[in-house]
Image (tube, helix red, strand yellow):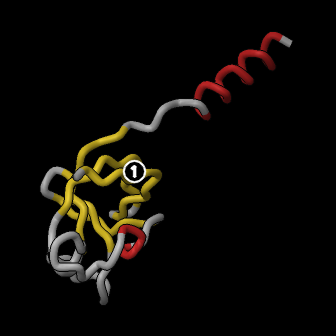
Amino acid sequence: MKKLIVVLILVLGFSCAETKTQTVELSCGQCQFGLTSQEGCDLAVRIDNESYFVDGANIDDFGDAHDEETGFCEVIRTAEVSGEIVDHRFKVNTIVIKE
């Protein structure tokens, strides 16, 4: 019984662990970060001068990607994100744009 309780505590601890957030640059991978591994305009993050396409969010989730003032194909924006890099792609959990 004690082993079961320990296992449950460990499982709950890992499932409730906070995901670390970090400040990144967020923009169009092709238009702003020069990524060429896929065609079209796709959301990407730049972390420590390395760029990664984003899985879990779309470039148009934050408005028109081609808007001259706020569109990701036109400007690089700063955001707080949580997620992880897997197979040279950023698997996003949350994105909060900083204005």
Q: Can residue 48 be seen in this view?
A: yes
How far across and how far down the image is residue 81, in percent? 35, 49
Q: Quadrant of residue 71?
A: bottom left
The answer to whether residue 36 is above or below residue 71 is: below
The answer to whether residue 81 is above or below residue 35 is: above
Q: Quadrant of residue 97?
A: bottom left
The answer to whether residue 99 is above or below residue 2 is: below
How far across and how far down the image is residue 51, in percent? 21, 64
- Name the outermost residue toward the bottom: 39
Residue for point 29% across, 83% down: 41
Judged left or right of residue 99, residue 83 is right
Residue for point 16% across, 65% down: 76
Residue for point 61% across, 34% down: 15
How far across and how far down the image is residue 55, in percent? 43, 66
Q: Mark 1 points at which residue?
A: 84
Q: Quadrant of the N terminus?
A: top right
Judged left or right of residue 7, residue 54 is left
- Name the outermost residue toward the top: 2
